[in-house]
Amino acid sequence: MTSTSAHDVALEAVALSKTYASDGQDVAAVRDVDLQVGHGDLMAVMGPSGCGKSTLLHLLGGLARPTTGRALVDGVDLASMSDRELAEVRRTKVGFVFQAFNLVPVLTAAENVALPALIAGRSRAWAEARANELLGAVGLRDRHAQRPKQLSGGEQQRVAIARALVMEPSVLLADEPTGNLDSRTGRDIVQLLLELNQRGQTVVLVTHDVKVAGVAGRLVVMRDGQVQERSRPDAPAAGTPDTIDRLVDIDDAADLPW
Ligand SMILES: Nc1ncnc2c1ncn2[C@@H]1O[C@H](COP(=O)(O)OP(=O)(O)OP(=O)(O)O)[C@@H](O)[C@H]1O
Ligand SMILES: [Mg+2]
């Protein structure tokens, strides 16, 4: 649930805003957002297309710089960082998963997972061992030598999730990770994210699926760049059989327990 003590906070937004200049017009994609994500939280982010969900995730993970306000990862302010320091945060502190899997086609599954660790300067032995461990954790132990085109969409997304976790990031930021998958495969991916959260991984998940939002302990709804939080005081621990069953039970927003 919501954590408030300073060192429990994995991600924080303070009066965070991003305005794009587009064809001479300013677009306020994120407006004055205050938000905290505690270590161990599972937070769903919902809202209509164009409301600023991806932009917010990019700001929180240091993929984009805010126009005003601050984003902090593990209490460290990203605004004060040089481009080089920010790149280091992106490599080590946050893991991103997108709708498109973005795997390197010529590399095997294991090589794709190991790549960010090698770029971050870890030894080949360390990176290979970690890649194999993570491929096991996402259910792909036997597929480590396959290249992306030899894998199904769901398997490719599992590889992308393993790759995002290779440096043990404080938070996994997932932007519609099931958007390119059929509903059954998408549900398997959500279940994997729930299991990772159950093991302590902090997860922020953008989704259009009310079933998915229904299992998160925290729900942030965005409208026109602003957030409105709805939390469930009775939220069960994410990833328990109870919450996984709920994936099947919830059919539309009216069933949401908030
Ligand atoms: N690079 C950019 N330049 C100009 N405007 C942008 C840029 N990126 C996003 N925007 C605008 O900012 C607003 C928020 O976009 P964003 O991609 O964050 O929305 P979203 O909620 O993720 O939408 P979707 O559900 O369709 O992915 C939109 O109006 C979009 O057109
Ligand atoms: Mg988006």
Image (cartoon, grey):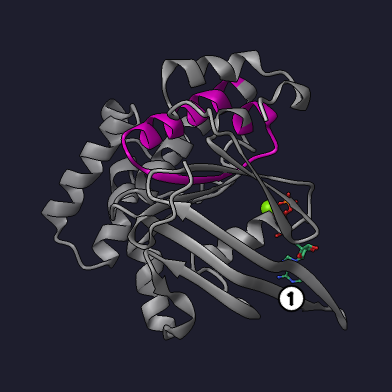
In the image, is residue 241 part of the stretch drawn in magenta?
Answer: no
205, 131: nearer the viewer: 205
**Residue at the disc numbered 1:** 19
Residue 71 % position (x, y): 51, 70
Corner quadrant of residue 26 = bottom right
Above or below 222: residue 192: above
146, 224: nearer the viewer: 224
SS at mark 1 in the image: strand
Above or below 110: residue 58: below
- Which residue is drawn at the image coordinates 11% and 52% (left, top)? 125
Q: Magenta stretch?
A: 184-213
- Which residue is drawn at the image coordinates 32% and 59% (left, top)? 116
Corner quadrant of residue 247 = top right
Q: Quadrant of the C terminus?
A: top right
- Which residue is drawn at the image coordinates 22% and 39% (left, top)? 132
Above or below 73: residue 1: above
Amino acid carrying mark 1 in the image: Thr
